[in-house]
Image: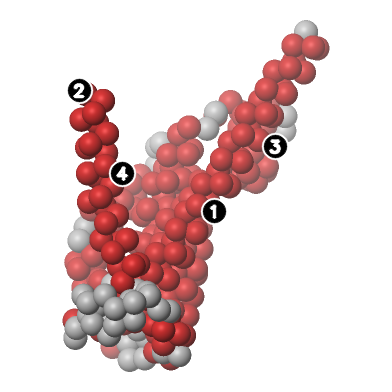
Amino acid sequence: MNSKFGRAWLIAVYVFLYLPIVTLVIYSFNSSPLVTVWSHASVKWYIALAADDDLISAVGLSLRVAFYSALISVFFGTFTAFVLHHYHRFAGRTLLSSMSSSPLVMPDVIVGLSLLLMLVSVQNWLGFPERGLFTILLGHALLGTAYAAVVIKARLHEMDGTLDEAAMDLGCKPFQVFRLITLPLLVPALVSAFLLTFTLSFDDVVLSSFLSGPGYSTLPMVIFSRARLGLNPSINAAATVMIATVTIAVVAFSIYQSRISKQRQREVALAYSENNQTA
């Protein structure tokens, strides 16, 4: 009884989560211009999508913003997590810990509005920056740093601190310990943080709407603005491309993480085997 209920509940959850996405993907191959009326299968909306200059430009802008904001987020998130994990007593630690995680719980509307007001004040004072690529990048990097710090800090808590102590005993300087010991062990977490912040940036609408300027519309902004004027089959095709891109990235990372985990298990088993033979 419990097993049947568990399977039924699992199926219901999967249907609730993925049925809308499956429906959207199926109707992206619908030949009819009416999105709710199925005619026959066709890829003409994907062909129309390839000829849509506005959408292609928006995809290029979204990819650039997502890539560079993910790099910036991982860079600052790594050092934020490293400082919070290794240094427990310094002035402002509590403030840094709370401020670095506050974007996680603060509504995007509030973050976007506060950034907009700050940028307008700076522009009135210094004459720059104008709203565009840089301001969108700044907002996404700010939000992404909070997520990256959480992911990397969780990995630092799992790591064995005795490795760092052993390296220090062997004469390594703190930066050498970070470069030779900590950083290689952090690679899976850095990749996770990069993919997470890349996806968040690529999917963001609210911050981009506040911080974008004329001629700088990301793909989610274009899709949202067109959807407000009425459902269009080309929007289904664009959304399907986004879903496929994210799915490929997640599957590729899962394969990479599985291989890293198996390689680590083999190395640990080999180390124990060599240690037993030596003893």
How far separated are the C-alphas under marks 1 and 4? 37 Å
Q: Which mark is residue 252?
A: 1
Q: Residue at x 70, y 18 (%)?
A: 272
How far separated are the C-alphas under marks 3 and 4? 30 Å
How far separated are the C-alphas under marks 3 and 2? 60 Å
Three-letter amino acid code at the position of disc 4: Thr
Name, please, the residue furthest toward the top: 279
Which is in the foreground here, disc 2 or disc 4?
Answer: 2
Three-letter amino acid code at the position of disc 2: Met
| Mark 3 vs 4, N-terminal side | 4
Q: Which residue is mark 4?
A: 94
Q: Which residue is mark 2?
A: 1
Quadrant in the picture for residue 278: top right
Q: Which mark is residue 172?
A: 3
How far separated are the C-alphas under marks 1 and 3? 35 Å
Three-letter amino acid code at the position of disc 1: Ala
| Mark 1 vs 4, N-terminal side | 4
Label count reads 4
Q: Secondary structure at mark 4?
A: helix
Q: Secondary structure at mark 2?
A: loop
Which is in the foreground here, disc 1 or disc 4?
Answer: 1
How far separated are the C-alphas under marks 2 and 4? 49 Å
Locate the N terminus and report the quarter of the image it occupies.
top left
Where 152 sits versus 272, above or below? below
Which is in the foreground here, disc 3 or disc 2?
Answer: 2
Q: Residue at x 27, y 34 (%)?
A: 7
Q: Residue at x 20, y 68 (%)?
A: 109
| Mark 2 vs 1, N-terminal side | 2
